[in-house]
Amino acid sequence: MKYIIVLIFLSACVLENKEQNINQNYTRKPVFLDSAMLTQSKFFEVNGNKDTVLTGEKGTLISVPANAFVNNQRQMVEGVIKIELKEILTLPEMIFNNLPTVSNGKPLSSGGVIYINAQQNGESLSIAPHKSLYIEVPTKEKVADMNIYKGSQDEKGKIDWEYQKDLYKGLIPIPSEILDWEAPSESIECGKFVNSINKSKYENTFITTREFENRARWINYLSSRADECSIGKQVFSIYCDYLNKNLYQADSVVYLLLANTEHIKRYQQHYIRQFKQFYEERLLNVDKNWQNGLDRQSSEFANLYSIRTHIINQRENKKEAETQATYCFSTNDLGFINIDKLLGEGETLEDVYVQATFQDTLSVENSMVYLVLKNNKSVISSSIENGIINFAGISQNITLPPNEEAFLVAISHKENNFFFFSQKINNKQKNNITINFEAKKLDDIKSFLEKMVM
């Protein structure tokens, strides 16, 4: 008996005009999910009466203000609190943790998932009213228009993501003397003009932030050629002229300057792309109250101040790795949190047809089948009911962004052995796929998936 996977994409459409719905009512948690597959938690013990900053294994920062938790009776909790953190930041990790990126039937493009829990003496806690956690999640490359989604799981293990709030777009200033604007070693002397600037003149402005630190390095790169040195100086002058405005406004002017500079447009387009990406982050400015001393009794500022102190200490002790981009946000909820945006929002989408069958009945009930979108970092799970396996329901349609690299990925388990299958989807023709499992070690499956999405 063959089990059928049907995924039909009909005509090109724009997501704004046509809603996608992925019927996952029968998605269940495979019984073979175990510690070998799941991302391991890191546990912290903190004093509930003190401000604390926690650092995850992959670089996630969590600022926990004093008196942040309450018990089931809504009473403030003091003493030792146990906090759990999972960092599920890559597509392979999302697959192995059975965390598809779908919100109310609509696929999401993910910037990473974290899980946070708090307990005292085995009792689950929640965040107190008027308190919040401030969180920074590292990323290799920031994607514009990301938001925060809260995850909820049903009794079958299906998770759905619900929009919670926007990312935090403010900036945290740090002392100018610990900023690193170092030009590349191959730069000519002209390219080092940014390093000679007296940064102390710009304390508590967006110029003395980690976000501008990355821009300053790009300005130095931009200035490393003699014919571009004047452009680099002009770019820095624009930022200085916009100190009283939001950072993204200065980014937009710089982007337009580079996009209209002939030799940059012809030979150095990566600068145009990078400063366009900076602009699309839509970052604001440093709160002027940093100069006057914010109310440190407020939960929001207590979190920001704690993060700032942590960053200063790490840099002074030379413990911080190379500056990374981060997604920043505050939350009043524990549990699963996903950094996402709706897949292909505002884009013209393409249609693809996929039909797949199992070669045999090997561990059908112990199988996971996903559609993995590499470019948009999205995982869409399948559903199984009465031997039918599908991604979008019998009569529903799914569409993909143009030039998306999509893969069908299947994992199965039988008698303590793992089996694996994958095949790239051809967006230009019909895909009739037979899932023919091959025995593989779990580490080999992980390695293959990591290479597949690189």
Image: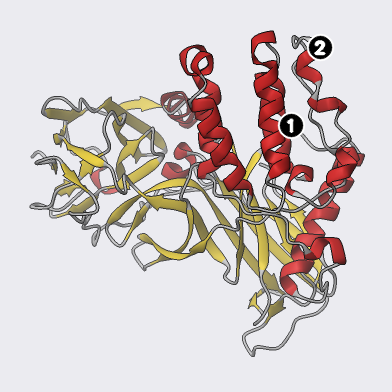
Quadrant housing the N terminus: top left
Q: Residue 322 got which mark?
A: 1
Q: Work out how far the residue at label 1 is from the one at label 2, CA to CA, in angstroms.
A: 23 Å
> Residue, x 50% and y 39% (percent of image)?
90
Give the camera-side residue of 224 and 18.
Answer: 224
Give the camera-side residue of 171 and 107.
Answer: 171
Q: In the figure, is residue 285 to the left or right of 424?
A: right
Kind of residue at disc 2: Glu
Inspect this view and state whether residue 99 appears. Answer: no
Question: Which residue position is annotated with label 2?
Answer: 189
Disc 1 on helix, strand or loop?
A: loop
Give the camera-side residue of 357 and 454.
Answer: 454
x, y percent for residue 361: 18, 39
x, y percent for residue 159: 38, 60
x, y percent for residue 130: 67, 80
Q: Are marks 1 and 2 in contact (CB under 8 Å)?
A: no
Kind of residue at disc 1: Glu
> Residue, x 74% and y 84% (percent of image)?
76
Which image quarter: residue 210? top right
Which image quarter: residue 306? bottom right
